[in-house]
Amino acid sequence: MNAIVRIIMPVALIAALFMAAGCVDGQAAAPGAEGEETTVTDGFGRTVTVAAPAERALCSGSGGLRYLVYLQGQDLAVGVDSIEKEVRAIEGRPYVHVYGEMFQDLPLFGEFRGKDDPEKVIAISPQVVFKTGSTGTSYGTSAAEADSLQSRTGIPVVAFPYGSLRDDAEKADMYYGLRLMGEVIGKQDRAEEVIAYIEETMADLERRTGDIPESEQKTVYIGGVSSAGAHGIISTEPAYPPFLWVHARNVAAGMGTAHADVAKEALVDWDPEYIFIDAGTIQMDNDGAIGQLKTDPALKGLSAVQAGRVYGVLPYNHYNTNYETVLADAYFIGKTLYPDRFEDIDPEEKADEIYTFFVGEPVFADMNAHYKNLGFAQIPL
């Protein structure tokens, strides 16, 4: 054996040992780079084996990418669906105000609401696809859809219902989804932080208003609620979470938990003390619900309209629920109805605190500017 060979062999052996130990140039190998895996049970009871933690992800369906941002995993996204490629004059998703340009530059893997293109997914080659949507809607998802995409691409698909904060069952879905995504991407601690923040915020609202006697609770209505687009005054949510959290009496309560259209005559009969308008309604002709309150003779006679107790809130239904906006709206509504119980709260400052926690930046002013600054303001009629 000549001298050169005698020198090269020990060096090669040492290098191999370092690589086997997962170290190169003194740095640990990237997580998951050596074939590490974990097995999870997704929101539909499916058992899925994925890289641990996954570093390249796609989020299919309404709301999935929002959860990735909440978990501070936005840099793991390696592709987007078609809605993230759009530049909108009115944009109601807080995370887009922060990361929109970054997401627009990513490759397209399918159409919005979960209409994936398996060939594009394969070409992008993520380690995992998160697939979500609202149960019971035309853009929900299912175990069958997840199985189909996984079998057609060979890429693990982790699916779960998006959930909501309207009731305990849907809140459990939401929390399971956050924890599941957190486990897959190695953000378990952040998932728990998000859940704890939501719980503490709701608890704070309860502490402020929970002892208000029913006889002193204000009667309220929310109109113009966005749901797969803008709507007029009859569009509402019978279980509108901000009303529940500040103990206001929703005159439309008892009509279920999801979106509902009520008869105009019912609204006139209810005659609530306060009317709140989802500012997303301005995307309709004549500013939607606002124009209706100004021009419809029956609606003009409502007590809230006559007394000037009509206020704007930011829309939170935009490609599924923007939970940070739900929480921010609750503080404005609480301050409006029960100012003595929210003396220490500036709703706009509170909104920016909430937005910063969820999406990393205080975007209230940017958001509100898209809605003619009607959010958190009295609407002149």
Image (cartoon, rainbow, N blue to C red):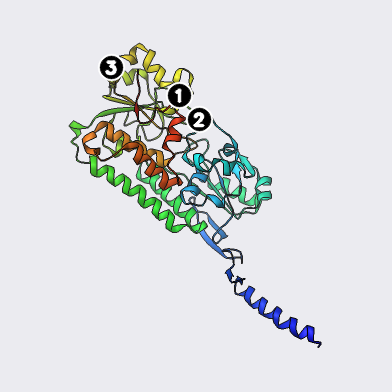
Q: Which residue is mark 1?
A: 282
Q: Which residue is mark 2?
A: 90
Of the residues under marks 1 and 3, which one precedes in the sequence? 1
Give the distance between the C-alpha atoms of the residues marked 1 and 2, in whole angstroms. 10 Å
At a point 51% along the width and 40% down the height, the residue shown is 96
Q: Does residue 109 lie above or below 45 as drawn? A: above
Tell me whether circle 1 and circle 2 mark residues in contact (CB < 8 Å): yes
Quadrant where the N terminus sits is bottom right
Question: Is residue 251 something that shows in the picture?
Answer: no
Label 2 sits on a secondary structure element that is loop
At a point 37% along the width and 15% down the height, the residue shown is 294
Residue 71 location (% of width, % of height): 47, 51
State the residue in front, 274 or 228. Answer: 274
Occupied quadrant, residue 312: top left
Hey, which residue is sitting farthest right in the picture?
Answer: 2
Quadrant where the C terminus sits is top left
Mark 2 neighbour class, 10 Å CA radius: few under 14, some 14 to 19, many 20 or more: some
Label 3 sits on a secondary structure element that is helix
Q: Which residue is mark 3?
A: 306
Residue type (three-letter) at the residue carrying disc 3:
Gln
Residue 358 location (% of width, % of height): 43, 46
Residue 336 horizontal side relative to residue 322, left or right: left
Mark 3 neighbour class, 10 Å CA radius: few under 14, some 14 to 19, many 20 or more: few
Mark 1 neighbour class, 10 Å CA radius: few under 14, some 14 to 19, many 20 or more: many
Residue 19 location (% of width, % of height): 64, 73
Q: Does residue 306 lie above or below 225 as drawn? A: above
Residue type (three-letter) at the residue carrying disc 2:
Ile
Hey, which residue is sitting farthest top in the picture?
Answer: 297
Of the residues under marks 1 and 2, which one precedes in the sequence? 2
